[in-house]
Image (tube, rainbow, N blue to C red):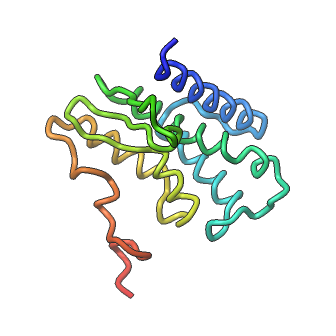
Amino acid sequence: MSTTTSRHSELLYAIEFLRQNSANANIKLDYSPASVRQLDRMFDEAFAEGKLRNPESSFAKQQGLILTGVAGYLAEVVLRATEASELVIDPEGRDWYMRFRVVARNGWQLQPGMRVIRRVQEGREKDLYHYILTAIDYARRPEGGPGEIESLTLRGNRSWWKFW
């Protein structure tokens, strides 16, 4: 078994762990873009200003596996909603679980793991639902998108629509 296949198996395990635990919490993750809203609600309940609300929670105890599962789930949502997109995992990458990519047929790429980290750190301003809708839109275009979705927001702590 190649390292890439092994890494892919690990990612699938994390996704399934997320889905099973979400089902226990009455959260239905069916790989639809709309289901990503439930992940945003989960993050709102688990985190405040980049920190866990309850450091003793089961979420806190399995945080690494859950965050990897969320990243993998986001990738799978995009893969299922687009044609000829593929998952790319660097078999030698030390932090592959957050740096794997989805590459669309048009060459456009996204790194869902990095968005998950930003969602934890910056909260609702970096919601996952709109990220996925934008990713699917760009992946379906013949010419792709503007590089990465992150280029749609200004650098710094404020979103493009905040003027103060």
Name the side, left or right, on which 107 lies relative to 157: left
Residue 106 image position (x, y, % from top left):
19, 33
Residue 53 image position (x, y, % from top left):
75, 64
Query: Farthest residue toward the bottom?
Result: 164
Residue 130 image position (x, y, % from top left):
42, 52
Tell me if residue 146 comes above or below residue 88 in the rendering.
below
Residue 76 image position (x, y, % from top left):
47, 30
Residue 14 figure quarter: top right
Residue 144 figure quarter: top left
Query: Farthest residue toward the top?
Result: 1
Name the side, left or right, on which 38 lies relative to 57: left
- Name the residue: 24% across, 50% down: 147
Q: How many marks?
A: 0
Query: Farthest residue toward the left?
Result: 143
- Name the residue: 80% across, 61% down: 54
- Name the residue: 85% across, 56% down: 56
Query: Farthest residue toward the right?
Result: 56
* Image quadrant in which the C terminus is located: bottom left
Residue sitting nearer the eye, 117 or 35: 117
Tell me if residue 49 comes above or below residue 84 in the rendering.
below
- Name the residue: 34% across, 48% down: 134
